[in-house]
Amino acid sequence: MSAPTTTTTPSAPMLEVRDLNAYYGKSHILQGVNISVGAGEVVSLLGRNGVGRSTTIKAIMGEVAPVGTVNFKGRSIVGLPSYKIARLGLGYVPENRDIFPTLTVRQNLALGQKQANVDGRWKLQDMLDRFPNLARRAETAAGVLSGGEKQMLTMCRTLMGDPDLIMIDEPTEGLAPLIVKQVGELISEIAARGLAILLVEQKLSIALDISSRIYVMGHGHVVFEGTPKDLAANADVRREWLEV
Amino acid sequence: MGRASSLPLNLWDGATGNWVVSFGTQHFLIKRRGNVLELVLISTLNGVLYGLLLFLMASGLTLIFSMMGVLNFAHASFYMLGAFVGYQISKWAGFWPGLIFAPLIVGGVGMLVERFGLRNVHKNGHVAELLFTFGLAFVMEELVQIVWGKAPVDYRVPALLDFSAFTIFSTNYPAYKLFMLAISLAIFVGLFAMLTRTRVGLIVQAALTHPNMVAHLGHNVPLIFMLVFGVGAGLAAIAGVIAGPALVTQSTMAGLLGPILFVIVVVGGLGSLSGALVASLLIGLLQTFAISSNVSMADLFSFSGFAPQPNTILNDLWRVSVAQIAPILPYLLLVLMLIFRPTGLMGNRES
């Protein structure tokens, strides 16, 4: 017997972006972007610099005014203030590692929680146990951390808010190979815990490793959509839109 | 005066309270009225008190600027409004209810201004916001004049505190001034404790530099803006309530103090709370000492034998005392600061 779930739309993705446009002044940056991320799915957004990957994420969060359809968990989030979007369970790790420099590492993590002392899937002590570098500096002002530590802290801080989908913008940019490996491991663990991920990356290897689907962007819209295997097989797309 | 020194030195003669300026074997006497020790003690107390009062206002101004990017021209108007509302409540119910309710009322007004004024104007950019607060200052001054008139109102020190706390030499120091000092200190300590020890304070601190990121973590940043604006207005009102009886409660009091607040915020470094504290005390002490000093160029250089022709502009300038130029000293400091250290004492902003 089939489950009576026909009235709802169980196959609707957690995040659905349709015909998304965005402008910086008169520049038409996003020209009808279509992407979707299902619950628990790991999706990467690839492309060269300046094709609109970061702007796509910013438009989803409302930091850049979005024109088009953005649905999260079945409701439209276009025009919502970003704190309300965050409270719906959409986490955002911006590319500029916006740690709070005057606060300590512990305080930074604590502010990731949407309410004081309400633990979700991620607990403050777990974070410190997992990352000795952060634990050692728990009471230090976060402004003195290294670039890699700041990246870890930003991701951990957003995780403290217990999001269901986390959007991570260029987490490995400018980091040493060893740190890149750690960031990759953390992303894998986020995925293993069942969170959906929308990852903007330059490094093809990480995206190919952990993604279930990949979008490639060029000139403000999606030019390729497929599995990592599809992309690996498609040298034309890689040459035209990814390789430098 | 039997003081001698091989170096040019300023020596204070404790016995007479005079300054003796010695160059080699030449001694020059600068006569003072009163006791210099007394002057220094009283001026220091008054300077710290004035500085802390300024900090009550400058702290809110610098927090609001840092967080919202709005230089609030109407900030001193909340100080004035606090004094008048406190006066009105004191007429009905006495000084003490005024001290409690006037800041709450003015803080509420501040929140309404943010929620229904600034938040709407914000969409049109910073120039619109500046013009909005600029206009608001005029509106508030006019409204206060309509309600309470242009003349100073009779805002009295409460009878409970209307006595002399102690006497240094010949100066009676009013108990009310000590009370002002205590209130300002208590609020300063409370403000720092709140900002560094509570979760709301940490969110405010984070929003000072990264308001967008704070919102992305799910904190209601517009609400925090409104609260900070309200608390800033309330702090200014507390300054108004406690300064009103000691100074003059009049509709011009905002215009008199407003420019000094901007000097403090710039000298301390835009957005720096500790910078605002240091600059407040600096300006407070500078102005208090300046107005009690009647030294002029003529006094300082009397040893040179130089004296300008009488009845010339140079002669007038030569005889201008520090007390006479006291009001422009803060602005002089502002100009020097902008030339030599544009970020302010503790500021770290590039823009």
Image (spheres, coloured by chain):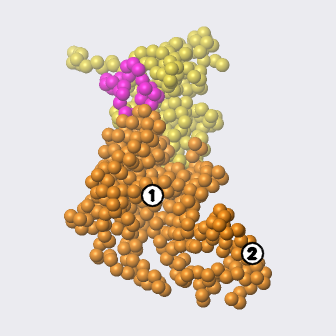
Magenta stretch encompasses residue B78? no
Q: Picture coordinates of residue B348 (x, y %)?
A: 58, 49
Residue type for callout 1: Leu
- Point 48% across, 86% down: residue: B169
Residue type for callout 2: Gly
- Residue B257: image tag: 1
Instruction: Determine whether the residue tagged by mark 2 lies in a helix, strand or loop.
Output: loop
Check whether the beta carbons of the residues at disc 1 and disc 2 lie within 8 A of each other. Answer: no
Quarter of the image with the N terminus of chain B in it: bottom right
Task: In the rendered view, tell whether residue B279 sits above or below residue A65.
Answer: below
- The shade of chain B is orange
Instruction: Determine whether the residue tagged by mark 1 lies in a helix, strand or loop.
Output: helix
Q: Picture coordinates of residue B227 (x, y %)?
A: 35, 48
**Any part of residue B85 in sight:** yes
Nearer the viewer's eye, disc 1 or disc 2? 2
Instruction: Give the chain of mark 1.
Output: B
Q: Looking at the image, which residue sits at the far front?
A: B311
Neighbor class of circle 1 (other Cα within 10 Å; few <14, some 14-19, many 20+) is some
Residue hosting label 2: B305
Image quadrant where residue A208 sits = top right
